[in-house]
Image (tube, rainbow, N blue to C red):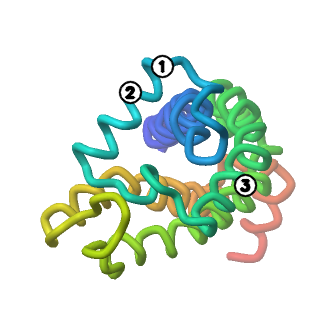
Amino acid sequence: MGLWRRFLDILFFFYFFTHIPIAVFFDAQSVFPSHFFPRQLVTVREWYCKSYRDAMMADPPSWFQSLVMCEMFVQLPFFFVASYGFFKGAKACKWLRWPCVVYGTHVATTLIPIIAHVLLHDFSSGKVPGPRNLQERLTLLSFYSPYFVIPVILVVDSLFSNAYKDKYEKKALAKKSK
């Protein structure tokens, strides 16, 4: 159990820690003017949008921009807190439990319209090229899906793992099971 716990701590730390530069340097480009970013970062985004046909990032609809604004002003501050907490470990930072439940639920919920858009939207009449076939849709989805899967794992772990329970909770649960 200890090895599994440490694996999850490392997975969650890596997820949150790497999400900081992704949010600031990449995702933010869909809501802030391009002159806020170094030309090299704008070029990387343009290359990504063209290579993977991500029409949402190339010409973001307002609903997508609203989700990115939530990422910038609600989620981004939590990335720092969660990175610290999972670096220390969930057992040492039991206070992470409920913020992780809130974060994971929020993010998984925001990914549902993104996933639906990638899978169901007709991109043939768009201003910018979107995925043309199922293969391209699934490739694009592979960039977004970790931001659904890992938050769901985070919620399940936060709700059911013993790492977040204190010794009194564990004793009470042990008495109930007798």
Q: Residue at x 71, y 52 (%)?
A: 69
Cα gap from disc 2 to disc 3, whole angstroms: 24 Å
Residue marked by disc 1 = 39
Which element carries disc 1, helix, strand or loop?
Answer: helix
Q: Marks 2 and 3: which is nearer the front?
A: 2
Q: Which of the two discs, 2 and 3, labels the residue nearer the N terminus?
A: 2
In the image, residue 27 sits, relative to residue 36, either above or below, namely below
- 171 relative position to 40: left or right: right
Residue 125 position within the rendered picture, expressed as x and y whole percent measured from the top left:
31, 75
The disc labelled 2 sits on which kind of residue?
Thr
**Numbered mark located on residue 61 in the image:** none
Task: Please tell me in which quadrant of the rendered image residue 28 appears.
Answer: top right
Q: Residue at x 31, y 80 (%)?
A: 122
The C terminus appears in which quarter of the rendering? bottom right
Q: Residue at x 47, y 61 (%)?
A: 148
Residue 126 position within the rendered picture, expressed as x and y whole percent measured from the top left:
35, 69
Cα gap from disc 3 to disc 1, whole angstroms: 25 Å
Q: Residue at x 65, y 60 (%)?
A: 67
Q: Marks 3 and 1: which is nearer the front?
A: 1
Residue marked by disc 2 = 43
The disc labelled 1 sits on which kind of residue?
Arg
Cα gap from disc 2 to disc 1, whole angstroms: 6 Å
Task: Please tell me in which quadrant of the rendered image residue 82 appears.
Answer: top right
Residue 9 position within the rendered picture, expressed as x and y whole percent measured from the top left:
55, 36
> Pointer 2 and pointer 1: residues touching (CB < 8 Å)?
yes
Residue marked by disc 3 = 70
Binning the other alpha carbons within 10 Å of mark 3 as few (below 14), some (14 to 19) or many (20 upward) gives some
Which element carries disc 3, helix, strand or loop?
Answer: helix
- 20 relative position to 121: left or right: right
The disc labelled 3 sits on which kind of residue?
Cys
> Pointer 2 and pointer 3: residues touching (CB < 8 Å)?
no
